[in-house]
Every structure is written in C-alpha cells, then in structure tokens.
Amino acid sequence: MSDHPEGGDAKPAAGGERESPVADNQVAEETSSTVVPEPSEHLMAGSSRGPVDLGVTPAMQIASAWAWRFLVIVAAVGVIGYGMRYLSEVVVPVTVGVLLCALLVPVTNGLQKLKIARGPAAGITVLATLVLVAGLLTLVGTQIASGFSDLSDQVSAGIQELRDLARINLNITDQQITDAFNSLRDTVMSGGALGQRAAAVGTTATHVIAGVFIALFCLFFFLYQGDQIWAWVVRLFPRQARAKADSSGRKAWVSLTAFVRATIIVAGVDAVGIALGAAILGLPLVSAIGILVFVGAFIPVVGALISGIVAVLVALVAKGPLVAVIMLAVVIAVQQLEAHVLQPFLLGRAVSVHPLAVILAIATGVVIAGIVGALVAVPTAAVLNTIVNHLAGNDVDPEPPRRPLPRRRPPAAASAEET
C-alpha cells in the first residue's frame, strides 16, 4: 500500500520541509565536532558563578599577550623619548658631563694619589680642562685673524676659478651665476627671515652657554662624589634588583671609558696626521684644520667625512686641484689607518656595536639634539648594548670586580676627611 494518497503528489506535513531526492539529509541531523569542542578543549576561567568558557584559542591568547605588552613598551619608549627631547637642555649637558668624567677621572685620581683632597683635585681637573680648551680656541682665532687677508684673496681666486669652470664645462653664463647669488642674498636678507634667524641664533647661544655651565657643574660633582651619586642611584632600585643594577652600571662604565679614551686617541692621531699633511703641502689654517678634524672624529662616519671635505676644499681654494687631490689622498690614508688599525686595537671587544646600529644611533641623535646628539649617540648605544647583553647573560668580557657601595656618612666625618 502506498503511503501517499492516490491521485496526488506527496506533500510535507504541516510545519515540515520536503526532503530533496538528491541531498544528503542525514548530515543536517548530526553535529560537527569543530563547532562544539570537547569539554577538555575549552578555555575555562573561574568566576563567582562557576567556570566560564572564554572562547579564546591559545594562539589568540598568546598573540594578545604579546600585543598589549608590545604596545606598553612602545608607549614607555615614546614617553621617555618625549621627556628627553623636552628636557634636552638638561639631558644633553648631563650626558656631556658624564662623557668628560669618563675621560678625566684618571687625572683626578692621579692628583688624589699626590695627597690632594678629592674636592680640590676635581676642581683642578675642571679648571685645567677649561684652560686647555680656551688655549686651543685662542690659537685658532689668532691664526684665522692673522691669515684672514691672504685667505680672502685665495677664496676670491678660487671662486673665480670655479665660475670659469662652470662657464666652460656647464655652459653657465656669468649673468646666471650673478642672478643666483643675488637671489640667495635676497632670501637671506629678507626682513622676516633675517629677524627669525637672528632670534633663533640668540636663543641657541643662550642655551649653549647655559648648557656649558651645567656640564661643568655636573663634571665637578661627578669627579668629586661619583661613587656617592651612583650609590644613591642604585638605592632607588628594589633590594632584589640592586646587585644587578650595580653590576650593569659598572659594566656600562667600563664600556664608556674604553670608548671615550679610545676616541680621544683616535681623534688626536687623525688631527695630527691631517694637520701635518696640510702643513707639508703649505696650506693655510693648519691649526684650525687640525682642531676641526679632532672634534669631527667624535662623530663616527659623518664627522670624518665632513672634516676631510673641509680640508680638501681649503687645499682646492688655496693651492689648486692637484694639491687638493694630494690632500684627499692624505685624508683617506689617515682615516683608513684609524678604521683598520687604531679602533680595533684600542676598543677591542669592550665596545662592539654593529655598523647599522651606529648609523641609526647617529640619525636618532641628530633628530633629538642636533650635533650634540650625534656626539653622544654612539657612546649611548654602546652603553645600552653592554647593559642589555649583561642582563641577558651574554657578556663578552668577564664582569669587573665588585666593589661595595659607599654608605652614607655623617656630615662631621665627611668634613673631617676632606680636611
């Protein structure tokens, strides 16, 4: 007997659906195990109402944990960077004071061994540094003043020679060159721009003078009470972290002193070599070139390039293209000696920073604090690299000997020791 009424097609019951003759209707009645996982695969969390299914996979939990920690670290770095940039007029002089302390602390220690108290020894070191810098600046100023008339004539002749070369080789007329110079002069001498530049120069000069005094003040106290200041900094850390903070600071100080002293030696060799070459070639402003090379050597890569270009340009203006080529060869030879012999021998493994990190550190320093930022960028990167490697247990050199942190002394005992 047929289940369907005669003379009519099969119709679904009320509320039902007609089954397809080709569909796999049995699948609709089953439940996929991927939709409702087994209880053992649930991520549960406790609450006052009992266990709660979080519904988050382990991969998502790990990714979110990394993500919010990364965002917190980026935010912290951004806040620290903004604070350092906002307070750069204080941060930069203090950093310069630390660098000078790393350079000059042997002088203070030597004076103290001669039975001179620590305070007067630090003061003598600072005053001697000021006298040395003032003497060098006076020497440069005297040389520039004495040779200014001859140099101006040589510059005029050099400019005329360059104009002739441009006219012959580049088909540039004298009128075009004159128009370009007049346009540049009008831009510089325009009222608003000139006033803004004068105000900016005045503000910068004021900041530089204030920064010099802050740096000297910090230098004196770093030389005089460096151990006490460092002990106070270490005591700011939790007790469990003080030993590691102290060892990290001592490792960083070893790296910093190695960098600064090696850089001084390298800068001196560069300055003497290039100045000697300039003197042999009969160039003017030999002392000025030497001091410029000495200062430029503190900025890796960029400083050597700029100081070398200046020396070659002076040779080109004063003596012509042939002497300029010889001066370029002297600069390249001295800088190759520095890069391949002096720096690896003096620095060794105490300061091991990748060249890419050096370039990025210099660029960051220029963005934050200009030329001074470029000066302190590489030693800062070296110190941070040393601290990170030490905290991670990847020290290259053995840890320096541990010294006990100086304790606070009563004022009466401290004054008695000074006298």
Image (spheres, helix red, strand yellow):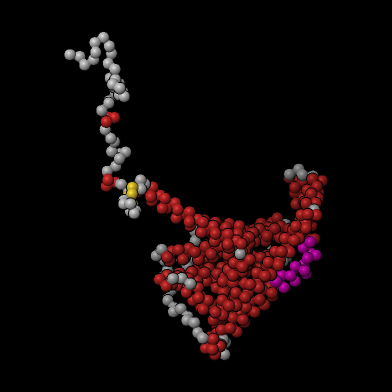
Residue 144, percent from left and from top:
75, 67
Is residue 178 at all visible to an observer of this figure?
yes
- Residue 140 belongs to the span the image colors magenta: yes
Query: Which corner quadrant holds the N terminus?
Result: top left
Q: Is residue 306 above or below residue 64?
A: below
Residue found 53% across the figure and 64% down from its top: 380
Relative height, residue 193 to residue 267 (above, below): above
Q: Position of residue 333 (x, y in %)?
A: 59, 61
Quarter of the figure that contains the C terminus: bottom right
Nearer-the-camera pick, 94 or 31: 31
Q: Residue at x 46, y 71 (%)?
A: 237
In front of the other: 185 or 175:
185
**Residue 108, relative to residue 299: is it above or below?**
below
Q: Residue furthest top?
A: 7
Location of residue 95 by image quarter: bottom right
Residue at figure coordinates x 43%, y 66% from the top left: 390
Viewer-nearest residue: 380 or 19: 19
Question: Extreme front residue here?
Answer: 14
| Magenta stretch bounds | 137-152
Q: Position of residue 351 (x, y in %)?
A: 49, 65
Instruction: Describe residue 43's horizontal placement relative to residue 298 as left or right.
Output: left
Quadrant hosting residue 130: bottom right
Asked if the stretch drawn in magenta spans residue 60, the answer is no
Q: In this view of the protein, which residue sits in the foreground, 45 or 369?
A: 45
Any part of residue 267 in sight:
no
Main SS category, magenta section: helix
Instruction: Give the vertical position of 221 relative to 194 (above or below).
Output: below
Choose top left, top right, bottom left or bottom right for residue 99: bottom right
Look at 58% across and 65% down and name the residue there: 376
User: Where's residue 124, x and y in %?
Assistant: 62, 82
